[in-house]
Amino acid sequence: MSVSVLTKKGQTTIPKDIRNLLGIKPNDKILYLIEGEKVVLSPLKGNILDLRGSLNTEEKPIDFKRLREETRKKVVRNIIEEMK
């Protein structure tokens, strides 16, 4: 079992064995998935360009707030599918 300490600024160091398991390196992004009372860490891989064409943007004018939310949901769904 790995343990880390939370600083006053809300920061912590992910233990080396966990970083190795997730394959994460400095400057990699981490997704925090909330599942009830638990939080699952998952490396955020890929590129925003991988989502090109996945959203319907034919409406005028474009609602960027809605577009960002749909993109976020698509990224999360893709990551969850990769975890299965």
Image (cartoon, rainbow, N blue to C red):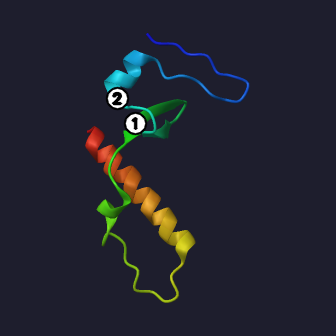
State the separation of the CA atoms marked 2 and 1.
7 Å
Is residue 57 positioned above or below 83 on the image? below
Position in image of residue 66 (x %, y %):
52, 71
Q: Quadrant of residue 28?
A: top left
Q: Secondary structure at mark 2?
A: helix
Residue in the image at 52% along x and 13% along y: 3
**What is the three-letter code of the residue carrying label 2?**
Leu
Total numbered circles: 2
Residue occupying the far right of the picture: 8
List the residue tagged with mark 2.
22
Residue in the foreground of this view, choosing between 63 and 52: 52
Residue at the extreme top of the image, as rendered = 1
Quadrant showing the N terminus: top left
Q: Is residue 13 left or right of residue 46?
A: right
Mark 2 Cα shell of 10 Å, populated few (<14), some (14-19), many (≥20): few
Q: Secondary structure at mark 1?
A: strand
Sequence-wise, the earlier of marks 2 and 1 is 2
The residue positioned 36% from the left and 72% from the top of the image is: 55
Instruction: Tell me residue 39's x, y (percent).
Output: 50, 32
Residue underneath mark 1: 42
* Front residue of this view, candidates 34 and 16: 16
Residue sitting at x 34%, y 55%: 47
Position of 11 with respect to 39 (left or right) is right
Q: Position of residue 49 (x, y in %)?
A: 33, 63
- Most extreme residue toward the bottom is 60
At a point 41% along the width and 80% down the height, the residue shown is 57
In which quarter of the view is residue 12 placed?
top right
Tell me where residue 72 appears, x and y as whole percent.
46, 57
Which numbered tag is attached to residue 29? none
What type is the residue that disc 1 sits on?
Ser
Query: Contact (CB < 8 A) between labels 2 and 1?
Result: yes
